[in-house]
Every structure is written in C-alpha cells, then in structure tokens.
C-alpha cells in the first residue's frame, strides 16, 4: 500500500489516476482549490476503493503558494505518511487567448511554471525529509519544442520539464525519484473545444501508462506512449519546416 | 458550428454537428445530453438547426453507495461497465442491463433499457428511485416514482427530451456468485422457438435467443434459446470471472465483405456450432450479458454506409404466429442480418414511452443499402397490423405517420414534455423527424 497526494485529482487525468490507485488499495489525499469538488471526488473514491481505503482532502490552490505547505502537511498527517506527490493540475489557454489577454498569460505562466515549481519544491523537501519518495508531475509534450499553437503554454511547460530533469539529476542519489509525465492530446474538459488531432488519448488509458511509470520510476513518461515517437519526429524537423507547418 | 465535424449514432450514419465534453453537467449548455452514443439511430443526435450535444461521459462520479441496501447514486455519465468493474467482485450487479455495458446511466434511463430479465424485472427505469434533473428553465430538481411523478414517467424512456438528467439513483442487486449458470438449446423453427422461449420464462429469470432470419420454408426462424440464472455458491468456482479482452476493429470494412453469402454462411455456422441439441454449464457474466462487447468498434463492420437496427415488439394478443408472419415479410425481402435477437417481454411499464410490452421482441441489424427505407416501411406496416411498436433507441428510418399510429401514448408524453419545456429547448434529430419538433 502506497500513500499518494494528488494535486488536481478531482478532474480529468488526475481523477482517473486517483481511481486506479484506490482500486488497488492505495491511500490518496486529494488537493484542489474547490472544497465542494474535493468532497465529491473523495466520496467517489471511497465508494470505489477497497474496504478500509483512506481518502483525505485538503484545499490547495496553485495560484496561492501560501496554501502549499499546509496542504501537504495536512495530507501527510491524514495518510500517516507519504510516498508519492503527484501534480496533474495546470491552467490551459489557447495561444490566441493568451496573446489577446496579458493578464491571462501571466496567470498561466505563473501557475504552470513558477507556482508548480514552488509546489514541487515543498513536496521535494517533504519527501527528502522522509528519506525519499516519488514526485510525479504532469508537464506536456507542448514543452518539447517551441511550436506555433503553444508558444506561451509550451514555454511554461518546457521550463517545468527542465526543472524536473534537474531535480532528477540532483536528488536521485538521495532517494527522490522524479517522474515527468508528458501527455499528448488527451480528451478531457481541459482540451474541450480544440480540434482533436490523431493519436488523441483517453484519461483512463493515460492513467494506466502513468501508473506503470510511477511504479517503475521512469524519468520521462509519454502518454499515450505513441507521443514519444510523434514528438521525436517533431523535434527532428528543421526550423524552416517548423516555420511553415501549423502544429 | 465548427467545420468538418460530424456526429453519428452507433449505426454510423453521420450528420454535421459536434459534442461538448464537460465534467460539470449542471452548468453545461442547455442542449440535448448524450452519453456513450450506443443508440443506433438519431436519438442521441442534436437537431440540425442547433447541431450541438453535450457529452456526459466525463461526469462519472459515484456520489454514494450504501453497502447495506445496495442503493447507488451517481452522476449521469457513469457507465454500466464502470459499475460492473467496481461492484461485481463485491457481490453486486445491475438490476437490469442491456446487451452492451458501454451505456451511461443517463442513457439507460432515457432509453429505458431492458435486458434478458425483462419478463421478471421489467426495464431499467422501473428500478430508478430518484433522478436529479435540470429542466428547460434552468431549475435543478429531483423526481422519482413518488415525486414529480409525471415528469419522472416522461423522463424515463423520454430520450432526453424532458430535460437533462444529472444524477441517477437506483439499487444494485445482491448476487450469490459472480458466475452464470446457462442452458442453451437448438430449436428447428420459429414456432418451436416461440414456444420454448415462452415456456422458459416460467422457470428462468433470464432468457433470450438468436434466430437465423435468412432461412425460409421449414427452417424459418430456427435458432438457439438461451436461459440463465446466477450460479449458487456450491456450483461456482472461487475464482472471479475477469473481463474478456475486447479486440478493436481496425478499420471500416469494405461493403462486399457483407454479401448475402457471407451473412448466410455466418448464420449457418452460428446455428450448427451448437451441435448438441442442448448444452448447460457455467459461463462468465461478461459473455452472458454482453455479446455486443466481444469487439470494440464492431459497428465498423458494416462499412461506409453504416447500418440501422430494427427492433419491434409484437404483442401477445397477436398470437404466437405473429413472429412467423413477421419473419415471412422479412425473409421475402431477403433482409440480411447477422444476429437476429428475439426475446419475450413482460408487462409494459408506466413510463409514457417505454418500449417493451407483453409479447415478443425482435431485433435485427440491417446494413444500409438503397432499399433500406422500403424494407423498414414494410416491416413497420407489418408491426402496425399486429398492434406492435418500435424501439426509439434503435430507430433511424421510421416515418412519422407510422410512429404516430404505433404510439397512442405520444400525446400524453408531449403534454408533460411541453409543460416542462414549452419552447422545446431540448430536441433531437429524432424528435424533429418523428415528433414534429421544429428543426
């Protein structure tokens, strides 16, 4: 039995992931900004989990860094320990929306990069203090290469991926396992309204892939896995091609 | 409307349109709700004038489960499969399930689905104790058999036209083991088939069967009757029956694969595969309940033009020979179908538009060809003669005048519907086609 904290576990991929974890008997603390939603999701997990499963909740808002430490501490207490911290939460907006609205751009850039990193720093300290653990963070394939439709969002995710790689290099020997998840296009509420590209994933399938990576401690997990190949091809494209194509 | 987007039912006949995916049904756009899209025709498709439907499948949280009574309350997008995977190994099962588990709770209520136990347990809606809904004026309210009863009876089997179903509450049922004891029997013709099926209903809680609907003459309607019940502890192994792998059809099959010859060969093989006259033994609930889930995307088999399903019920008053008369009309037109499913139904439910009633239900797949409309018309005329009716969740081709003639209950349904939705906010492609709604 493992004890996981999931920031963003009420929705989308985080919801699928939390369900699969409790179904195999793990304990989960859900972190999120809306107390009502947290309670609803906790009830769902308790109804699905094996008997005796423990599900805790704590309010934590990526836009309010002062909530980070108390939420992690409350979770650690409620679960009587902590093995994994998972971050699936993020803000998303299209390139057009971000270009048109600098305030929105600031929010997205702060939440997806600076604040996520600050949250990870708190989590890292907590896990190292316990002698080690796993930090699993959802970055994005958008961070693999600067591209027309994700200039700003992709930049924040690129920063996040770089940070996670650095963590892995620096703290692996001290017992901190870092898993950077790079979801491709996944059909969730977050991507609602966007044109669906080929190889689009489903949150439940992504959750299976992530759990595999989590258990194995894989440093970089593409989900669905085919996106490793897709991004490999995109990264190999010369600049003059990238200037012309629209993806 | 976004460009290049299309939306279709399980029969893969597409129209322009798209779905909105949301986890928060209470604040979703006020348009038709749609679940996993397993209805075959146009009942889950939006009206052409406003081609948007809300996809509910991400609103899939369990709200409460009472281990002592089995009462489950959940968001409407929760699938029956999800319920089975969660509760079967804990000794609970759905009170009623259709032949696929890829159905949402909201869809199960809206189509008032039925299953192999209809002759004893009725439709899904007869087990529902509460619905939480959002109606056309934006109010969120609850209804049930004892609360806003008319709205409830219009919503069950109401094809999503009375409002948006947000949450569903109903009891799961305790099962002795997760295994099924099954008996199957090969029967030489339609008359013997109907007799066996009616007879089996007295002794078995679950019955259904398959008939060959191509053979004519003395083999007409030969088939296999299946009967089942939950196995008792002393009959069943201790192991848990795992869900079977579901290979995915990789692509749309070309139409020539589905010639009368291949269908004939399939029907012949299916019948004679059951070599002994009678077979009995344990089987897994996945195999028993969900023949439609052996392969994912099996609807691609019918090729580019897609297919339609035709399901009708022939009332008991029409007599045991009604099934034979129906098959005569069908086979005379060479109506090709892989599986023709036939089942006896119990009494009609109180829900205004619920499909089943006492009699024999016949369901068949029909690949779309140039003469499909004519075939459906001929079948509908025959069903009208017998006093039967069709199942909206399958239909894409019935003419409004045929439908009205089959459905004296429509007026009452429309009365209640209009009381809650005077401006017809909730419409579907099907309600435009059959109920006379504005596009």
Image: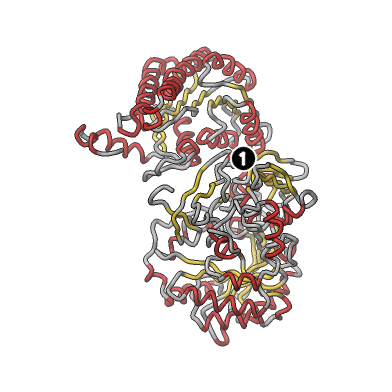
Residue B392's image quarter? bottom right
Chain letter, disc 1 residue: B
Give the residue drawn at x 55%, y 42%.
Answer: B58
Res. B236 in view? yes
Vertical order, B205 against A233 (above or below): below
Give the image location of residue A63, x and y in percent: 51, 20
Residue most extreme to the bottom: B217
Q: Quadrant of the C terminus of chain A?
A: top left
Give the image location of residue B231, x and y in percent: 70, 57
Q: Nearer the viewer, residue B7 or B347?
A: B7
Residue B275's image quarter? bottom right
Give the residue drawn at x 51%, y 23%.
Answer: A85
SS of the residue under disc 1: helix
Give the image location of residue A186, x and y in percent: 44, 39
Vertical order, B34 against B259 (above or below): above
Q: Quadrant of the N terminus of chain A?
A: top right
Give the residue drawn at x 52%, y 12%.
Answer: A129
Vertical order, A134 against A188 (above or below): above
Q: Nearer the viewer, residue A203 or B396?
A: B396
Give the color scheme: rainbow, by chain, secondary structure or one colour.
Answer: secondary structure
* Crowd class of label 1 (few under 14; some 14 to 19; many from 20; radius 10 Å): some
In-image side of B273 versus B344 (left or right): left
Q: Nearer the viewer, residue B116 or A2?
A: B116
Question: Which residue carries the number 1 mark?
Answer: B26
Res. B235 in view? no
Q: Nearer the viewer, residue B177 or B17?
A: B17
Vertical order, B389 against B218 (above or below): above
């Amino acid at each position: 039995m493992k004890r996981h904290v999931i920031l963003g576990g009420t929705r989308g991929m985080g919801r699928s992931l939390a369900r699969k974890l409790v179904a195999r008997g793990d304990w989960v603390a859900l972190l999120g900004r809306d107390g009502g939603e947290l309670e609803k999701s906790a009830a769902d997990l308790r109804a699905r989990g094996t008997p005796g499963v423990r599900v805790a909740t704590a309010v934590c808002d990526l836009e309010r860094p002062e909530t980070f430490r108390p939420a992690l501490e409350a979770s650690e207490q409620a679960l009587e320990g902590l093995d994994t911290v998972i971050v699936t939460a993020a803000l998303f907006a299209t390139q057009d929306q971000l270009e048109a609205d600098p305030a929105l751009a600031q929010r997205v850039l702060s939440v997806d990069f600076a604040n996520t990193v600050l949250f990870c720093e708190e989590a890292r300290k907590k896990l190292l203090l316990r002698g080690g653990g796993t930090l699993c963070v959802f970055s994005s394939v958008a961070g693999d290469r600067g591209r027309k439709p994700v200039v700003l969002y992709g930049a924040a995710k690129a920063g996040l991926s770089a940070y996670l790689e650095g963590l892995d290099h620096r703290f692996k020997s001290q017992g901190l396992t870092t898993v950077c998840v790079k979801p491709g296009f996944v059909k969730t509420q977050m991507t609602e309204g966007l044109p669906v590209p080929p190889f689009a994933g489903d949150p439940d399938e992504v959750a299976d892939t992530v759990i595999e990576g989590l258990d194995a401690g894989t440093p970089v997990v593409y989900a669905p896995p085919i996106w490793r190949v897709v991004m490999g091809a995109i990264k190999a494209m010369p600049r003059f091609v990238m200037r012309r194509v629209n993806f | 409307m976004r460009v290049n987007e299309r939306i279709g039912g399980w029969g893969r006949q597409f129209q322009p349109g798209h779905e909105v995916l949301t986890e928060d049904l209470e604040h979703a756009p006020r348009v038709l709700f749609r679940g996993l899209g397993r209805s075959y025709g146009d009942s889950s498709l939006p009206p052409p004038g406003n081609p948007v439907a809300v996809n509910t499948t991400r609103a899939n949280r369990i709200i409460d489960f009472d281990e002592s009574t089995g009462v489950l309350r959940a968001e409407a997008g929760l699938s029956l499969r999800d319920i089975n995977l969660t509760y079967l190994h804990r000794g609970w099962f759905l009170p009623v399930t259709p032949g696929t588990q890829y159905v949402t709770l909201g869809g199960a209520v809206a189509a008032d689905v039925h299953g192999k136990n209809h002759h004893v347990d009725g439709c899904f809606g007869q087990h529902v104790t509460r619905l939480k809904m959002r109606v056309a004026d934006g109010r969120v309210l609850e209804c049930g058999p004892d609360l806003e009863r008319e709205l409830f009876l219009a919503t069950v089997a109401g094809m999503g036209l009375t409002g948006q179903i947000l949450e569903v509450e109903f009891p799961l049922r305790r099962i002795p083991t997760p295994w099924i004891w099954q008996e199957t029997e090969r029967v030489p013709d339609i008359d013997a088939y109907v007799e066996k099926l009616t007879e089996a209903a007295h002794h078995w809680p679950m019955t259904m069967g398959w008939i060959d609907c191509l053979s004519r003459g003395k083999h007409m309607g030969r088939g296999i009757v299946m009967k089942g019940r939950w196995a008792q502890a002393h009959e069943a192994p201790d192991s848990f029956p795992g869900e079977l792998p579901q290979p995915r059809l990789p692509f749309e099959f070309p139409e020539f694969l589905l010639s009368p010859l291949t269908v004939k060969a399939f029907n012949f093989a299916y019948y004679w595969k059951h070599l002994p006259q009678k077979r009995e033994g344990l089987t897994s609930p996945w195999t028993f309940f969900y023949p439609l889930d052996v392969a994912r995307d099996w609807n691609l088999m019918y090729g580019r033009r897609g297919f339609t399903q035709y399901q009708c019920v022939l009332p008991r008053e029409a007599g045991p020979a009604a099934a034979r008369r129906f098959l005569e009309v069908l086979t005379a037109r060479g109506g090709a179908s892989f599986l023709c499913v036939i089942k006896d139904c119990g009494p009609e439910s109180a829900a205004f538009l619920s499909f089943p009633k006492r009699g024999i239900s016949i369901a068949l797949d029909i690949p779309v060809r140039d003469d499909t409309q004519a075939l459906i018309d001929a079948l509908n005329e025959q069903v009208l003669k017998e006093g039967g009716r069709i199942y909206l969740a399958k239909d894409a081709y019935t003419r409004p005048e045929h439908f009205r003639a089959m459905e004296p209950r429509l007026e009452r349904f429309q009365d209640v519907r209009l009381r809650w939705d005077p401006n017809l906010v909730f419409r579907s492609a099907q309600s435009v086609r059959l109920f006379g709604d504005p596009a």
